[in-house]
Amino acid sequence: MKASRLGTILWTLAAAVLIHGIVRQLELGGLWQGLADLGTSLLPEGAPATGIADALLLGLLLGGLPLLAGLRSRHVPEAALEIAVGMGLTAGAAALLFAPLDWVVTTTERPLLVYANLLGGLAGVALATDGCAGRLRTLIGVELLKVWRGRLLRTGLLVAIAATVLAGLAHEPGPGESGWTRAAHALGVGFWTAEILVLVLGATMVAGEISQSTMKMILPHAYRRAEWVAAKATVLVLCAGLFALVVSLTGILHTTADAGLDDVTREAVAGFGAEEEVEVFQTAAVMRGRMIDMALAATASLIASALVGLLLSCLFQSLVPALSASFLVFAALKTGDIFLGFSKKTLDAVYAHYPDELRRLTENFGRALNESWDDTLLPMGLTLGLLTGVLCLLISLRVFGRRDLQ
Amino acid sequence: MSEPLLEIRGLRKHYGAVRALDGIDLQVRAGSVYGFIGPNGAGKTTTIRILAGLIRPTSGSVFLGGRDLRADRVRAAQGLRALVEVPSFYPGLSGRENLTVFAKLARAEAGDVDRLLEAVGLTHAAQRAVGGYSLGMRQRLGIAQALVGKPRLVVLDEPMSGLDPSAIHLVRELILAERQTRGVTFFLSSHLLHDVETLCDEVGIIHRGAIVAEGRIEELLGDAISGYHVRTADDAKALEALTASIPAARPRLHPDGGLVVEGDEALAPALHRALLEVGMPAIAVTPMRETLERYFIEKTDGVMG
């Protein structure tokens, strides 16, 4: 496929997901509601209307944008037929892909899809730029090889697994606590450890290369500095995702094997004519949904931390100051209420530790308090993660693109 | 004369009040080996760092294949390879893996890695982690990475540094072979003037941030006689006589025997006369041509690199 044709396709895809994200975010006019209503009418009761609405909107855009471009050509009838078929197929495929995803994230008003679309759109725009896709692919491959073959990632994963398992084992369940409490403790420590590790990984990305003088070996090649930063950021995002996956799976598997992750129950004491019975506080399915919410929000936080590390890495000429600054930032955010006088509420808003929320909930269940789940946790986590990550990436691009490397 | 592959126009780099480069202009022809020499701190590495994209010039332009390296780096730097100072690699990766990283960056063919490992004599150590390599082995690997893929211009900063004599010979042969078989252009910075004289077609001498001489070596040095090597029956007595009669020629004993005097063709009659006056005619008088070392010293006010 010619690069120009590939570029056109990528631009179309990028524009489609961007517009889709904006429409979803702003709920523009009656378009979104109309699509949602259509979804409701087409699907059986209880199915997520938003999923099919997403699919329809993306299908329309993916089909419609080339149509607008095609109107300028002389082959409109043929193009229109192709586009109509393409729209139908795209809508069907998108429905299959996105509806289950939307099911997972039903607890939020702004589903994950919106953010994925916006990021996908931005990435698509970058990829569609002249020859950029191939260069980025090469650089990402190179960065993945370097990170994977380096000791830091593999050691870090082992440390994160060990921390998660040990935290689970060390937790002594209180009266009335379920396996979910143990899982929340294990995940809390696991994500804490992972947070430090991805911060370190991010801090080594550029400053480490400058320190060991490999930067001067790679920069002469025909790539833009911005492409290097983008590749490193992509690999960091993948690493943060890997850490989140490994910690989550370790926590869940370990707890399932050890204590079980069943329904959260409470024994009602017999009396006043009532018999003793076991009341289900929360079903395992609901708890799983909350754990997924927590894990996704914590993953966004990990990604943001990794990109904070990358930014610090771009600011310093050598590794030691970059690592020191990373630890200082981490410590300041974790202990800012004690040492810097920030209010706990402000700190929690800026740098929340999402597993704590799950732990608090499960501990309250143990105290027979049927607390409600904070539905803003996931959108808040995703928004904070996205904003921090994008901001750090933009500053990193700016800083690294302009500095002299000695 | 072929088109210049590399052209530097008015390149300046200032660090505050310090003028590391003060308006350099030079041209490197495609397929040539260009020697870039100068004393320490003259601006060689700054120029190479700008070429390698590590630092940005204060002003001026660098054109590679007619494209501005700063404005259109992705296209202009196609085929640009550089080895700046001591080569560094990822210590946890093996020699082969390190070279694979650079081969990927250069979008080179898979067989290139093995070919170059063999060319620089590192096949036996290819699987070892680079962290355990000696300086010489790193230098060889550095040369290999600079030649990976299809290089057009290879910038080498002190490529012979840290190499033993056999490795120096190997690198020298490699440069000449790459130039001859693939038409690769080399921009070579070195303190080893003998190597520069042997390898390079043209040189540029940089001193205090400015080019003080540039051109083909034979044109710069010319055919002019710079002195004579004199053999006599008694070198000590001849030295005494020459020192007394022609002190301006700075007569001195040559380590390999005989004497050396400095001067052009006009010195010859005075030399013979002085020796005949003490009854010691010369057995042989061999004229000496200008050397790059002497030329370099002359152009840089006697500052040795």
Image (cartoon, coloured by chain):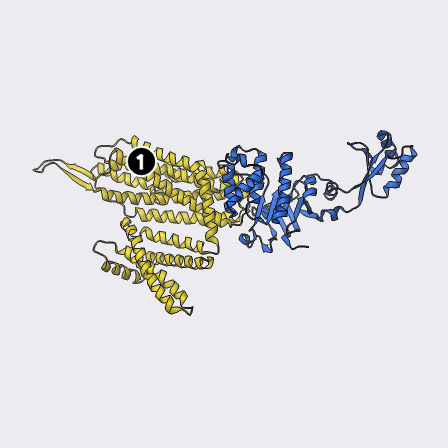
Chain colours: A yellow, B blue
The amino acid type of the residue labelled 1 equals Ala
**In this rendering, position of residue A102 left or right of residue B84:** left
Q: Residue at x 29, y 48 (%)?
A: A376
x, y (%) of residue A118? 38, 54
**In this rendering, position of residue B235 left or right of residue A51:** right
* Location of the C terminus of chain A (image quadrant): top right
| Dot 1 alpha-carbon crowd within 10 angstroms: few under 14, some 14 to 19, many 20 or more | many
User: Can residue A268 be seen from the camera position used here?
Assistant: yes
| Residue under label 1 | A186
Q: Residue at x 16, y 40 (%)?
A: A279
- Asked whether A318 or A139 is in front, the reply is A139
x, y (%) of residue B36? 66, 45
Query: Which quadrant holds residue A193?
Result: top left
x, y (%) of residue A348? 34, 43
- Asked whether B24 or B182 is in front, the reply is B182
x, y (%) of residue A169? 30, 31
User: Can residue A316 be seen from the camera position used here?
Assistant: no
**In this rendering, position of residue B5 left or right of residue A402:** right
Query: Which quadrant holds residue B287?
Result: top right
How many numbered callouts? 1
Q: Residue at x 41, y 47 (%)?
A: A389
* Location of the N terminus of chain A (image quadrant): bottom left
What chain is tagged by disc 1? Answer: A
Q: Residue furthest left?
A: A273
- Secondary structure at badge 1 equals helix
Vertical position of residue A95 compared to residue A327: above or below: below
